[in-house]
Amino acid sequence: MVRLLHHKQGFTLIEMLIVLSVISISLFIVIRHSTEIYSPNNLDDQIKLLTSKIDYYQSRAIKEKQTVLMVFRPDRNNIRIVFQKYHKDIFVPLSPLHLDMNSNLHTLAFNSDGEIMKFGRLNFKYHSESFSIIFHIEQGRYRIIKT
């Protein structure tokens, strides 16, 4: 009589180790290079990142129906966010951008409608490049000038 060998369905230990090593190597490569791909490393990305922070706090003032004060602090290179109803301030770092000391706007207040009552200019440097954000009165509008 011939005995039939039953072949078990599944992986051997060596096959499983090979598959796991291939998966771990590919994950390592993807994770390592994804931080380089998605990091904002040029001036346009830095401008978008900064303006999205400003837009976020403007929309938060509208949503929560309260005044949000943004204090630009060039000596510490950050923004202090003060909410009308809360007692805790938020500090938003500006690095790798550098806020110039010669900016003529130090505070920016968004009212509950998202409008600002003060105009001015913020000057920033990023590596060897520089740009300015010019704020207009009412409606919280601004424009960007690359210099």
Image (spheres, rainbow, N blue to C red):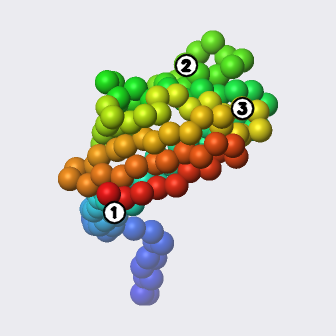
**Residue 89 numbered mark, or none:** 2
Task: Calculate the distance from the C-alpha at mark 1 to the C-alpha at mark 2.
Answer: 33 Å
Residue 31 visible in the displayed image: no
Q: Which residue is drawn at 64% across and 42% down?
A: 137
Q: Given the current orientation, which residue lies at the most extreme bottom position?
A: 2
Amino acid beneath label 2: Asp
Vertically, is 23 above or below 81?
Answer: below
Label 2 element class: loop
Q: Residue at x 63, y 12 (%)?
A: 87
Task: Calculate the distance from the C-alpha at mark 3 to the C-alpha at mark 2.
Answer: 17 Å
Vertically, is 104 above or below 14?
Answer: above
Q: How crowded is mark 2: few (under 14 residues within 10 Å), some or many (20 or more)?
A: few
- Pointers 1 and 2 in contact (C-beta within 8 Å): no
Quarter of the picture holding the C terminus: bottom left
Label 1 element class: helix
The residue nearer to you, when weighing 131 against 68, is 131
- Residue to which mark 3 is pinned: 111
- Residue to which mark 1 is pinned: 37
Horizontal and vertical percent for residue 109? 62, 30
Does label 1 or label 2 sit earlier along the sequence?
1
Vertically, is 13 above or below 63?
Answer: below
Q: Residues within 10 Å of mark 1 (few under 14, many from 20)?
A: few
Amino acid beneath label 1: Ile
Horizontal and vertical percent for residue 40? 36, 55
Horizontal and vertical percent for residue 67? 70, 27
